[in-house]
Image (spheres, coloured by chain):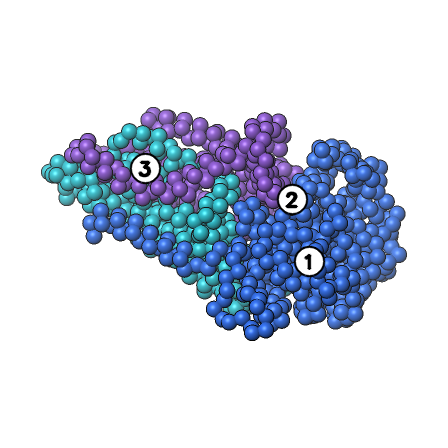
Chain colours: A blue, B purple, C cyan
């Protein structure tokens, strides 16, 4: 073919490809029109066919089938609504979500974790669910675990429905405790008890360590609370985490290094590998790891974490929300409600060990509680007696990074603990302006 | 030359340029210009943007994190470029000979280039593990106490440099090899008939005729690696304690984590001007050392 | 090698010394290349090995290069958990189209910048290069909005359109064309050929190594492209392989054995393209037949 023809052919081919593609695809996933479906609507209801998009980070990779089961159950009960699930890995999720929201193509419904939800709510990106909830005759908010329901309210408006919750416990290797003849941890332990036990359990020469606790924002605000301190002042205008109690708390995290805690296990999955290979006696980590530890070759159990002045435990919650720009608020509400509190959905989650549905009815968790290991699954709920929620501001991610990096500098010895915390407090205060 | 002027010549120019210029303008230049506009706003992506004029640029000047990122980026490139150039050149020269198993070698050296950073980063983390990694193990055999590599603020950037140079050697090799292969045999034959030795042939035939390819590799490597991101993001996330924080990592963090899209756009435009300046200087200087045809 | 030997015997040095020197240097080169080659292959071997490990296997050093027990089911598992073949087909289709288009447009533009004279040529070329200097993360938002207004969100078109032009490719081929001796082209012009003929019959064949190289790079870049497909594609039907595989990364723990299996699958087509491309990176057409 002559070059001119080749060039023209290339251009023509491109045009055809582009035309075909844009014609053949479904309408942009940004939920807009409620186009009537090909099939006839049921004779009884004049409802039009609606497609809702649901964007999630918690389904892939292990629970796609479980989510699908919930979707099927919902679509059976609501034949006029079909749910289109979109997934992304957690690390990529917010990049994609923000791009979509920024360009007006937000998914109808999506998932948010608590720390990020505040920025979305205060920016007006979320649908106010309050009128939908009150208009819904057979909806009773008490079906949800109260604290979980409350954290997703702002200015008296409900902007999300809690979907999952999880917390952090003290995991321990029973075999190592037996070998060192140390009593197992229990609910009465304090920091001092943990430290003493860790000392007896550490055998650095053989690469066995007493305990591991991550040194970052999330652990810090928790141990701060355990030490009776508070992150912000009462009116929320200044940071108070660098006071004496904060310094003590940070020292608790950092002081263990190289004595009873390894200083080079901060890489991805390194602490997990250490525990799984039987070289870590105690480990502060989340209940989401129960399935991953099911087959380890040693006996292990969990206990609530020790406190100091008081007990304080993490409470992590995810919510599902609707976009403020969705064209189908009523259908979105129906889906959100079903996804989080229907019996079908809760049963699927419990059976699949897919984090915990944030519902109040504890009897639904019987199957979860009876699974072993660990034996002491009741600790998951015991910990809920004394929870501390993350301090949240609009520039959440920035604040988390400031605190985590300050702690990192202290851990590496670049700054003293006081210097690091003071520097962080100054930077966080600047954000609060 | 035939047809230098006139409409038919213009037609030829348009014909050759349009297929790439039009998509480029539409899908690359357009968004770039829009991003320049973004640098004049404050925008967290969730609520409508707010025009703030040049405030972002003013803020950039005083940003210690940005300054640190710039220094880290320069350090990265300064360490990376020599390694990858010399290494890639040596391998390309070696593979330019008629050796047995050439294709296997070429494939082997190109493999890291096409493997994703997720895999490569993991492997290097594990190779450089301070306790049980192979590298420190070998160093210990010769009596050197290996450093903390990724965990150590001093050694984190060298770790990234080594891993990056290793991965990109194949890229430089492929380009230089193509350049070497384009040098007609006749030139070498003529030179050896004239009694030229190996080194003379290299200096007076190979090197000069390779300069267009070398120029390309230099310009592209600088542009790409001043924008280093993927490996830093996957290996160290800018840590520990900001030791590997680089410019594009700051841009991405500000844009998508901190809700500072306008600030990120300003950062990237300032950086763009710097990159453009460096590249223009390189193009000016090429007259001095690059020989064409 | 033969010429060198002949030349040196003509110059009077002993051929036996030269042959021995040659052997030593060859051996050294081979040894160095092999050592280097092994270092290069290592991650691939390790990736392959991990893809045959069972789920509980740890990723702690020291590693076991030969997994025990050997788990053959990972590949089947990712194929059943995800529409792996669909991802592969999508990646293949998009990469193939993008490569063809990029090579074509870059060759033409490269020729224009290397051989044609027109006003503003250097400034325009600088514009091309300048497009390489702004990270995608910053332009992705305007580009997404543009696609939305074109109605192309979540479409193959959106995956291909931004990839038609390649400043990298244009630059590469411009340099390659500039490096070609002009005598052949000038001879052809004097014989009455136009630019298109010269481009097709002389420049392209002579620059085949560079063109093949560009084809390989374009394919690799399109194949491994992640951020843009992540943002622009929602339906699993249109997802490409890297985005599909990223879903294997859980929030708290990643199944490395599965991810490595997927990554191995992702590397194979590129290797095939590379091996094929290498055949074209051969020594260019010799000049001898055209002299005189």
With respect to residue B181, does A53 lie above or below?
A: below
Tags 2 and 3 touching, CB below 8 Å:
no
With respect to residue B68, does A151 lie above or below?
A: below
State which mark lies toward you, 2 or 3: 2
Quadrant that contains the N terminus of chain C: top left
State which mark lies toward you, 1 or 3: 1
**Image coords of residue C173 (percent x, y):** 32, 41
**Image coords of residue A48 (percent x, y):** 55, 65
Q: Secondary structure at mark 1?
A: helix
Query: Gap between marks 1 and 3, in whole Å?
Result: 64 Å
Q: Which mark is residue C43?
A: none
* Mark 3 chain: C
Determine whether, in the image, residue A430 is placed left or right of residue C277.
Answer: right
In this orientation, does residue A210 appear? no
**Image coords of residue C15 (percent x, y):** 25, 42
Quadrant that contains the C terminus of chain C: top left
Q: Residues within 10 Å of mark 1 (few under 14, many from 20)?
A: some
**Image coords of residue C96 (percent x, y):** 36, 55
Front residue (pair A210, B191): A210
Determine whether, in the image, residue A308 is placed left or right of residue B14.
Answer: right
With respect to residue B14, does A153 lie above or below?
A: below
- Residue drawn 68% across and 62% down? A337
- Residue drawn 54% across and 38% down? B248
Residue under label 1, please give it.
Answer: A132
Residue B280 occupies which quadrant of the picture?
A: top left
Residue under label 2, please give it.
Answer: A123
* Mark 2 chain: A
Determine whether, in the image, residue C244 is placed left or right of residue B202.
Answer: right
Q: Residues within 10 Å of mark 3 (few under 14, many from 20)?
A: many
- Is disc 2 in the same subunit as disc 1? yes
Q: Which mark is residue C175?
A: 3
Front residue (pair A397, B198): A397
């Amino acid at each position: 073919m002559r070059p001119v023809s080749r060039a023209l052919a290339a251009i023509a081919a491109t045009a055809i490809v582009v035309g075909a593609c844009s014609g053949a695809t479904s309408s942009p996933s940004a939920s807009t029109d409620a186009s009537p479906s090909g099939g006839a609507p049921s004779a009884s209801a004049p409802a039009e066919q609606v497609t809702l998009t649901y964007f999630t980070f918690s389904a892939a990779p292990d629970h796609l089938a479980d989510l699908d089961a919930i979707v099927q159950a919902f679509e059976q009960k609501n034949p006029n609504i079909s749910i289109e699930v979109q997934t992304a890995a957690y690390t990529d999720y917010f990049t994609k979500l923000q791009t979509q929201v920024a360009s007006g193509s937000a998914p109808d419904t999506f998932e948010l974790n608590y720390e990020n939800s505040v920025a979305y709510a205060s920016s007006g990106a979320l649908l106010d669910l309050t009128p939908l909830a009150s208009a819904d005759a057979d909806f009773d908010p008490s079906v949800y675990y109260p604290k979980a329901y409350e954290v997703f309210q702002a200015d008296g408006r409900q902007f999300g429905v809690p979907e999952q919750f999880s917390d952090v416990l003290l995991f321990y290797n029973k075999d190592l405790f037996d070998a060192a003849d140390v009593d197992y941890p229990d609910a009465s332990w304090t920091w001092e008890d943990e430290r003493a036990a860790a000392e007896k359990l550490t055998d650095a020469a053989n690469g066995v360590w007493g305990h591991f606790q991550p040194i970052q924002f999330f652990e810090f605000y928790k141990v701060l609370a355990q030490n009776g301190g508070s992150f912000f002042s009462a009116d929320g205008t200044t940071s108070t985490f660098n006071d004496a109690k904060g310094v003590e708390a940070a020292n608790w995290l950092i002081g263990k290094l190289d004595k009873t805690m390894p200083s080079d296990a901060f890489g991805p999955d390194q602490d997990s590998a250490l525990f799984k290979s039987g070289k870590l006696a105690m480990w502060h980590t989340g209940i989401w790891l129960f399935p991953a530890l099911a087959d380890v070759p040693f006996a292990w159990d969990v206990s609530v974490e020790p406190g100091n002045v008081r007990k304080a435990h993490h409470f992590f919650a995810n919510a599902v929300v609707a976009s403020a720009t969705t064209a189908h608020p009523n259908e979105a509400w129906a889906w959100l409600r079903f996804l989080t509190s229907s019996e079908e959905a809760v049963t699927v989650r419990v059976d699949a060990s897919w984090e915990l549905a944030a519902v109040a009815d504890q009897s639904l968790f019987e199957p979860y509680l009876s699974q072993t290991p660990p034996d002491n699954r009741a600790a998951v709920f015991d910990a809920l007696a004394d929870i501390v929620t993350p301090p949240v501001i609009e520039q959440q991610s920035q604040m988390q990074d400031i605190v985590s990096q300050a702690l990192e500098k202290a851990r590496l010895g670049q700054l003293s603990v006081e210097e690091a915390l003071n520097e962080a407090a100054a930077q966080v205060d600047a954000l609060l302006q | 030359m035939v047809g230098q002027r006139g409409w038919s010549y213009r037609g030829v120019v348009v014909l050759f340029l349009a297929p790439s210029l039009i998509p480029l303008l539409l899908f690359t230049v357009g968004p770039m210009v829009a991003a320049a506009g973004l640098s004049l706003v404050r925008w967290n992506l969730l609520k409508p943007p707010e025009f703030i004029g040049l405030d972002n640029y003013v803020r950039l000047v005083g940003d210690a994190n940005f300054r640190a990122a710039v220094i880290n980026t320069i350090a990265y490139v300064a360490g990376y470029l020599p390694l990858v150039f010399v290494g890639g050149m040596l391998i390309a020269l070696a593979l330019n000979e008629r050796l047995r198993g050439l294709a296997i070698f070429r494939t082997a050296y190109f493999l890291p280039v096409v493997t994703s950073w997720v895999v490569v980063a993991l492997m290097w983390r594990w190779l450089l593990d301070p306790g049980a990694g192979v590298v420190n193990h070998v160093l210990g055999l010769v009596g050197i106490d290996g450093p903390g590599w990724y965990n150590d603020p001093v050694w984190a950037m060298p770790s990234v440099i080594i891993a990056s140079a290793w991965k990109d050697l194949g890229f430089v090799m492929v380009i230089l090899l193509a350049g070497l292969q384009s040098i007609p045999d006749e030139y070498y034959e003529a030179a050896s008939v004239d009694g030229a030795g190996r080194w003379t042939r290299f200096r007076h035939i190979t090197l000069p005729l390779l300069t267009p390819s070398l120029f390309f590799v230099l310009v592209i490597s600088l542009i790409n690696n001043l924008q280093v991101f993927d490996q830093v993001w996957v290996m160290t996330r800018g840590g520990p304690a900001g030791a590997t924080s680089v410019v594009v990592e700051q841009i991405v963090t500000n844009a998508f984590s901190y809700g500072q899209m306008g600030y990120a756009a300003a950062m990237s435009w300032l950086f763009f001007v710097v990159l453009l300046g460096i590249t223009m200087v390189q193009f000016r200087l090429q007259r001095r050392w690059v020989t064409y045809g | 090698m033969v010429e060198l030997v002949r030349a040196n015997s003509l110059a009077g040095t002993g051929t036996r010394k030269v042959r021995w020197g040659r052997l030593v240097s060859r051996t050294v080169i081979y040894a160095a290349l092999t050592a280097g080659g092994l270092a290069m292959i290592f991650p691939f071997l390790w990736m392959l090995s991990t893809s045959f490990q069972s789920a509980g296997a740890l990723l702690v050093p020291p590693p076991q290069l030969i997994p025990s027990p050997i788990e053959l089911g990972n590949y089947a598992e990712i194929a059943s958990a995800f529409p792996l073949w669909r991802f592969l087909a999508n990646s293949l289709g998009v990469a193939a189209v993008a490569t063809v288009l990029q090579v074509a447009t870059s060759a033409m533009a490269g020729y224009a910048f290397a051989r044609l004279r027109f006003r503003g040529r250097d400034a325009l070329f600088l514009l091309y290069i300048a497009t390489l200097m702004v990270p995608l993360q910053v332009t992705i938002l305007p580009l997404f909005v543009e696609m939305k207004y074109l109605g192309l969100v979540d479409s193959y078109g959106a995956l291909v359109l931004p990839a038609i032009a390649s400043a990298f490719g244009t630059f590469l081929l411009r340099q390659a064309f500039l490096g070609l001796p002009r005598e052949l082209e000038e001879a052809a012009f004097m014989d009455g050929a136009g630019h298109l003929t010269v481009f097709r019959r002389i420049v392209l064949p002579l620059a085949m190594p560079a063109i093949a190289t560009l084809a390989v790079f374009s394919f690799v870049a399109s194949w491994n492209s992640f951020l843009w497909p992540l943002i622009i594609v929602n339906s699993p039907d249109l997802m490409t392989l890297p985005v599909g595989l990223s879903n294997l990364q859980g929030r708290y723990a990643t199944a490395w054995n599965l991810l490595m299996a997927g990554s191995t699958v992702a590397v194979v087509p590129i290797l095939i393209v590379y091996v094929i491309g290498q055949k074209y990176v051969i020594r260019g057409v010799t000049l001898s037949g055209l002299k005189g």
